[in-house]
Amino acid sequence: MNYWPLLGVLVVIIGFILRFNPVLVVVVAAFCSALAAKISPLHILELLGDGFLKTRTLPVILLLPLAVIGLAERHGLKQQAQRLISKVKGATVGRLLIIYLFCRETTAALGLTSLGGHPQMVRPLLAPMSEALAERDAPNLPLTIRDKVKAMAAATDNIGLFFGEDIFVAFGAIILMHTFLRDLNIETDPLHIALWGIPTAVAAFFIHSARLARFDSYLKAEQQRVSKH
Amino acid sequence: MLSISLVYALLGGLLLLVAVFTFMDQSNPKRWSSGLFWLLYGMVFLIGDFLPSALVGVIVIGLALIAGFGGLGQGFAQIDESKLLGSLQRIGKKIFVPALCIPLGTLFGVLILAKIQGDGWQLIEAKNVTLVSLAIAVLFALAFACWLTRETPLQGVREAKRLLEAMGWAVLLPQLLATLGFLFNDAGVGQAVATLSKDYLSLDSKFAAVTAYALAMAIFTIVMGNAFAAFPVITAGIGVPLLVLEFEGDPAVVAAIGMFCGYCGTLLTPMAANFNLVPAALLNLQDQHAVIKAQAPTALILLMCNIFLLYYLAF
């Protein structure tokens, strides 16, 4: 067994800890592992090219909506979202995000994963709404706290998506598990795999909701501290 | 038939236009290297299928070098305050419509357009229903947005350029990391990890085996950035031989909860760039790891929870 290809993993870990530019870290890691596996440089280039072409689906979701979102932003999308949410009495960052988490997780569980996402939902709508709620009672909230609010909005979208989509039976991950186990001569029912994901999905909702409720009290303390000055 | 190549052509065209605008953008101090980046990236989408793989590999390295050594600059995008105020009054809440057109239009495509088919043909290529539907929804939303805001599609391209510049090198990372995953596979990284964990972990108690499987899934996902990459390696290495065969656990439970342990890892790693680093860039956060920090407590508590769920549900 040749253990040297693990060098690439080491490069990735060290690179991220020392905060080198991630793009460069990845390229160096690729060459380390491939050379350690005695793959010829020309073949490395071919593998890189093939892999990059195969994964072109990834940036599509991210990049295609940008023109529309940019245009709408230029004409007041953010401001309208903030106006809308600030009229809702009793709304707080935590409550907004708990409701969003519930909707994101249930719709993803029904296979409707495209209803959320960072470019089309978090940046134009969810993050500005959360920010508006955070500064409703404290207009001069410092940038670090605003950043925390926006990061929490993005985190909530991820958590809702991850733990919702995996209990949808036609989702790729379920198929992957089913076919993989069949390869090892273990028969499973895809429906069972999906159903056994439900306890974790429920736990994820309650754990993150509890954290969002605590985030509200943290924000309240910060808002009071700011408005005293 | 509407296929994924049309989607690639659309995105390639967009990137090419972004490149042209970048070359012309005098306010961008690095307009030549930035423009070259978008030009090369657009080429991968437009004609990538016709180029030899090795040449694409060279392009990939070129892209990485430009992005990695700070070759991506930003132009100055002036915000026209009076225009914005006018739009706030004139368009009002209708501005939500084009934004919501994208998710709802995608949904419409997936649920309805994808069902349109006849003898041996279908409207949308079955393998890529979501992406093709997304592209249709985006085109529709763009047309509506242009009509609503009285702007041209080219202005849309300029806005896309502004957002792309705000994201910078993070744009390239998700795809590059996925490529690294393939390369690790070819280099036998997965096998090395599986052999290591089989040879050096002696797990006699059920609880220790469950913990080892859950943690291995999470940690290997943190390294690879993707639970799908970790699942086959760790499940073949620890999950099946120990939990299923030796301790006779239910394979459906082991698989389902094991995958979720991997997802906890995804929430913790910069390697899952599209979920963790790109949003930080999109939201202009100062700390590029802010999203990971917001997720970490949830991920760690949930991982612990998963260990107990696996222990009590699988046996």
Image (cartoon, coloured by chain):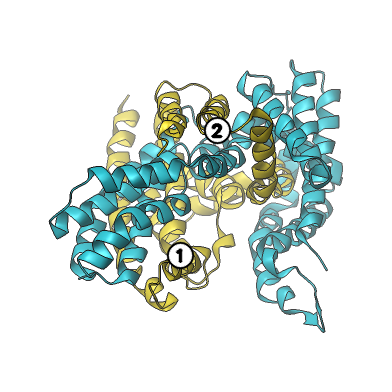
User: Residue at coordinates 12% horizontally, 57% vertically from top-left?
Assistant: B205
Quadrant housing residue B186: top right
* Mark 1 in CB contact with mark 2 (< 8 angstroms): no
Q: Quadrant of the N terminus of chain A?
A: top left
User: Which residue carries the number 2 mark?
Assistant: A34
Residue B297 seen in the figure: no
Question: Which chain comes out yellow in the rendered image?
Answer: A
Q: Nearer the viewer, residue B4 or B49?
A: B49
- Neighbour tally class for label 2: few under 14, some 14-19, many 20 plus, Cα within 10 Å: many
For residue A219, above or below residue B113: above
Q: Please, what is the three-letter code of the amino acid marked with disc 1?
A: Phe
User: Residue at coordinates 78% horizontally, 53% vertically from top-left?
Assistant: B142
How many numbered dots are placed on residues in this image? Answer: 2
| Chain to which mark 1 belongs | A
User: Which residue carries the number 1 mark?
Assistant: A180
| Chain B colour in the picture | cyan
User: Residue at coordinates 19% horizontally, 66% vertically from top-left?
Assistant: B247
Mark earlier in primary sequence (1, 2): 2
